[in-house]
Every structure is written in C-alpha cells, then in structure tokens.
Image (cartoon, helix red, strand yellow):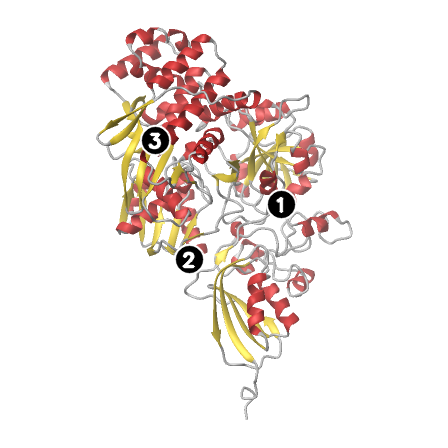
Amino acid sequence: MTKQDKCSKEAKTFFLNGIVQGVGFRPFVFRLAHEMGIKGWVSNSSRGVTIYAEGDNLNLFHERLIKEAPPLSKIVTMRTENSTCKNCETFKIIQSEAEQEANVLIAPDVATCQDCLKDMADPANPRYQFPFTNCTNCGPRYTIIRDVPYDREQTTMSKFPMCGTCASEYHNPEDRRFHAQPIACPDCGPKVQLIDAQGQLLPGIGVKELENGAILAVKGLGGFHLVCDARNTQTVQRLRERKERGAKPFALMVRSVEKAREEVIISQLEGNLLKSMAAPIVILERRSKHLNSLPEEIAPGINTLGMMLPYTPIHHLLFEGTYDFLVMTSANLSGRPLIYKNEDALEGLKGIADYFLIHDRDIYHPCDDSVVQVIGEKSVFFRRARGYVPLPIMMSSYHIKTPFLGVGGELKNAFCLASGERAFVSQYLGDMEGYENLQRFYQELDSFQRVVNITPQALAYDKHPNYELTRFALEQPLPKHPVQHHHAHLVSVLGEWDRTEPTLGIICDGTGLGEDGCIWGFEVLFGNAKGYQRKGHLEYLPLPGGDAGSKHPLRLAYAYLKTLLTEEEWVETEPFWSGLSAVERQILDRQLKTGFQVFQTSSAGRLFDAVSGLLGVCRKVTYEGQAAIELESTAQRFKLKNHLEDKHYSYKMSVENDEIILRIGMIFKELMRDLLLGVSLEEIAYRFHLSLAHAIVDLAVELQIEKGPLVLSGGVFQNKLLTEAILKLCQEKELEVLRSRTLPPGDGGLAFGQLLIANEVL
C-alpha cells in the first residue's frame, strides 16, 4: 500500500487573483495554515497566488482566507479545485513560478507604516533612522517593479543582496518582513548621499541646509522633488524664479495633520485622505490670514493649499528640522517630464537646486504625487498617480474583446490598457508636447504592458488630427478607431460606474475638436459606448488664435463682448480695455471682421477665462487653467464672507436644428452692469458661478428622461464651487448625478472612455 493510499485528509488547490503579491499575502496564508494545522504550500505565480492545502477543515480555511486577508490585499477572483492528497508533512512557501499567461495585480506604492516608523525612532533598533525601511505592509511597489511575478529579482532591489540579518527576517514566518521584497537594512541596502552644486559629498541629509534657506533636490519614491522651507518667503520666491514656474501653486508637505490645521480647514474625509496609505496631495481651503500664515508666494491668487504628509522614511527624516512645512514640488523643467534618475537631476537641476539628496535604489516607473480634492463630500482626482496606480477598474457590464490601448489626450495624459473585464489606467504623464514627453509616453507604455500583461491588438485615439498621440496612433500597424473627445468623457464615467445604458451627460472642459470642426467644450450629449447625439451646447463664440487664445483672457473677453453686444452697448465697455494696447485692439478688430485665425468655440473653459480677464482677476496666464482657478477663488471669498442669496445672472435657451443652445449674452450684460456700478469682483464672480450652475441644471431638466441619471464630466467639474452648486440644485430636483470616482474628470480619464467606445466598433 502506498503512502498516498493511506491519506484520509481532504485536499484542495486554491487559485487567487488580485492584489495578492507584495502585500504579505503568502506570509498570511502560511500563518493561517499553521494555526489551523493545514499542510501544503503557497506560491506566487504570474497569475496570482496558488495554494495547495490538505487538512480536516478546508471550508473554514477558505472562508478565513477571504475574511482575514491583509489590509493592502484585494482578492478579485478565487477558484477552488479538489485535489489528490499528497500527504505533505508541513506547510511552506515555495519558489514563485513564471507562466506565459500573467494577470496578477500589482499593488501601488504605499506610505511608511507605523511599525516601521517606530523602528526608525528607536536608537536600539538596527534600522534606526534608516532611510529605506519597509515591510510587507508598506513601502515601494509599482515604482520598482520590472516584471511579474512580484519577487525581489524582478525589482530594482535585485542589485542589493540581503545580508544575513535581513535574510533571516525574510525567511521567518513570524517576522513582519517575511517575504517583503524590498527588505533592506543599513548593512545591505541602498545608501543616500548629500551632494552640493559642485559635486562635493556632505554629511547629513540636508536638514541644516533646509533650515538655512537652501533648495534641495530630493530623490523620493517616484522621482525627484524640489524642496525648501515653506515659511522662508525669499527661498520660495527664489525657487519659483529658478524653476520658471510663473504663478502655479507649489505643493506642501506638512509634519502632521495637527500642524496642517493651523493653516487649512480639514474635514474628517480630508483628514482620512491625508492619513491614508496612498498619502495623496489633498487640496484644502486656507484659513483666514494670520500673523504667521504661510507666504502668499506658495499659491498666489488662490485660497487653497495642496498638502500631503510624509510618506517615505526619507521624508520623515527631513522633518527632524525646525520647520513644519516644506515646499515639495515635482522636479521637472518647464514643459518636460518628471526627473527620476540621479544623473539627470545633477545635470538638469543645476542652477535650480543648491544641494542634491540622491540614493542608489533605482526608480523603474517614475510616478508623480496624486492630487485629490473633496467636492460634494466625495474625493475627486485632479491627478492620479502614486498610491493608486496600477489599481484596475473592474467591469462586469463591459467586455473588452481584444486587448486594447486608449492613448488618451494631449494634455494631462494617461493612457489605458484593457482586456476582458479589467482596465488599467497609467499614472499621470503630463502634456504630450515635446520630444522628451513623447519619449516618456513610449517608455511607460512599453513597461506598463509587462506589469499588467496586456499587449494591445487594437487602439483608440482622439479625433484631433494635430495631436501628437493621434499621429502616433495612425502610425501603428493595428486596427484603430478615432473617438470624439467629449463622447470619451461621457463614456469614461459610465464605464467607471459599470453602466451601459444611453445616458444624458453635460461635458464641460477647455477644448476638444467637434464633429463640425469647431472647438467644443460645453456639450450636452446623450449616448453610451455605442454612440451619442449632441442635444445642446453653449452658443459659439469667437476664439482668436485658437487654443493659444486661452493664454490671453482679456483678449477673449474683448472678442466675446464684441460679438455679444450691440454697438450702443459696446461703447460702455471702454473702461474695461485699458489692459489692451491700441495695436492689440486693432489686430483683434481685424481678426473678428475677417475671421482670420478666429475659431468658433463652445468651450466652458474659455468662458471662465473670458470672465476672469474681464474682471481683471487674471490677465496673464502662466499655467493651464490659471484664469478659471483664480476666478473660483475670488468667488469663494465672497461665499465665505456673506449670507448667500441665490442671485444669479440671466441667460436664455433657444432651439436650433433640434439642439438647445445656451445663450449667455444676458450674463455678460448684467455682469458688465455690476462691474460699472462698482459691485465687488468677489460677488460678480460668485454670481457668475451660480449662473452656470443654474444653466447646467436647467439644460439637464429640459432634456432629462425620468429624473436621471445625469453625467457630469470634463475638467471644469474640478471646480469645487461650481460643482457643489450644481449638486445642490440637482438634489433639490431629485436628479441623480454620476461623476468620476476613480479617475480624474478631466483628460486623465479620457483614455478609458476611448477604448470602451472603440471596443464597440472594432
């Protein structure tokens, strides 16, 4: 009689897929099996985790695998097969297996856990003040992985052989670093170096230098930051000048939530976001100015600050200084991608940084900080990157027949790869203008395919013929399909909510090529992935210079009013144009008369620009969206100071060719009247926001079928004041609203919608 014949135990094999690698899942299974007397083995594979188990209570083992899984894990699918008992003597972790078909999910990078912080703070601990401490519950993941399965040799930690102590912890099931792939210590791990601008090595990590007003280039988890003491006004201004950043706000890193509350208002949800393992930048409302307020130079012209907590050991060590707030801005030169290599930082940031804090753990996937804001009691992404990528969007109502690529848009680009019922949106890559930005796109597209194991066999792209990524798409030897920009916005939200029925959507953004050759941007669409109808839009207005016209808000205001007003009404506008030279006015008049380089637009973004320019809020744009952002802050100041009445400007709606046209001439006439009467800019800006909120809801009510749902999408809905006013009005009318929840409402979510639409065609 054989040994196998004597086996009376039940035996099963479990196949688990999801985020089950690099999150302590195998150690969890190991400990659970030992506790329950289960024999067998657990292994990573390119498909996830495989468990062979034999014992007397495998049903309970199955239940506990699901209920007690590690907090960073996420089981997406779990399949069980009855197996032949092998009479195993123990339960062990065995070598990972690479398979041809890989679909394991990789966890995002997460903030340093409390246990590791305690180790760093304990002088008796071997990892006291060690800048790379981590365990199975925290540390780098996506930014260091080259391929799956997630094992040390597949990461950039492969060049650091474990010392005896680390190896002992790595193989000890009772240790929280058991099978933590980036495990390291001062004896065997990466090293940091502080270097001055002349290349000289210095002691420390730059704390004293920061206290003395220096600017540091610091290599972090996903790339370099430029760092300085946020209370040092002169240094902040020097950084702004050196980086040629214009008025674009700087992000801040703050010692603690308690310290942050001294400068900003933090709700419970905002506090939870700050303290989450993803540790994003959270956009927060400033408190009223006080004696020790952070300097205006951090975020000129706006009443919010973007803050995050320290999320790596290096960050925590930097806060041994006397400061509580550090400017922590991405280290990239104007219009170019994030710097993440030591040699590129030392060369490219010369003349910007005074000192360089570098290390020798390579970054494989450069990844910016994520940015979120709470709008309507929900977190809304402005930028989705570190801490969230490469988490997938799971779909049950959509099935991607052929592995697909959506290349995304030209601005704020993120691409999307999808197959079956999973879609993976890349980290934020930035604007696609320029050679280096395109090279970063190609680099990430290549490496991202390995991480998510999707090689596209078809692709979707924006219809705009002059986009760099449209040219890229057309060059690919694959089936391809062009997608209208605003249709992609609509379907992206529907896909996030896993809904397929035709739905009404109002899409408000800066620009997108319309089917009629005009620049769209305030669109009322009804449809789904199979197609759409344009049900309405903002009336067309002239855009001198095309998209470049958004950099000159006062010129936009001039063109809009010249078009909307009668000759008699135009005479009253003379006081508004002191900011335009006589030559500028002559050129604009000639353009408007001849139509030379004048494009017709229904853009909501350009409407905000024009109002901002007319009010004198912003007349020189130094970063994308500045005029609208500063206009919102101006309006928000009125909201904070006053008992509000729902007083808004007038507008009209007319029907042309079965489309509802929103007419805004009355808005400008009444706004101009208030301006001439000396009504405060804050009140005018606030009334303008209310006017658009009412107009949007009125359009929805006019066209809505059975109370909803209504999709709101496009970058304009990152405007907190406008969006919350719309949500309040929709609630009063019992109108269901769908908004982006796992992707940005702006162009960062575009690629997902593109491929869902193209999937229906190809």
Secondary structure under the numbered disc 1 in the rendered image: loop
Task: Report which residue position mark 1 lands on.
Answer: 312
- Give above or below for 566 relative to 410: above
Q: Which of marks 3 and 1 is nearer the N terminus?
A: 1
Question: Within 10 angstroms of label 1, few (less than 14), some, or many (20 or more) residues?
Answer: many
Residue 340 locus on image (x, y percent): 52, 42
Rendering quarter of residue 208? top right
User: From this viewpoint, which residue is outermost toward the bottom?
Assistant: 1
Tag 2–tag 1 contact (CB < 8 Å):
no
The residue that label 2 is drawn on is: 453
User: Which three-letter amino acid code belongs to the residue tagged 3?
Assistant: Leu
User: Which residue reaches farthest right?
Assistant: 124
Q: Nearer the viewer, residue 97 or 34?
A: 34
Q: Tell me the residue that label 3 is attached to.
A: 699
Q: Residues within 10 Å of mark 3 (few under 14, many from 20)?
A: some
Nearer-N-terminus badge (2/1): 1
Q: Which amino acid does label 2 sit on?
A: Asn
Q: Distance between the residues labelled 3 and 2?
A: 43 Å
Q: Nearer the viewer, residue 523 or 349?
A: 523
| Front: mark 3 or 1 | 3
Q: Is mark 3 on a helix, strand or loop?
A: helix
Q: In which quarter of the image is residue 468?
A: top left
Q: What element carries label 2?
A: loop
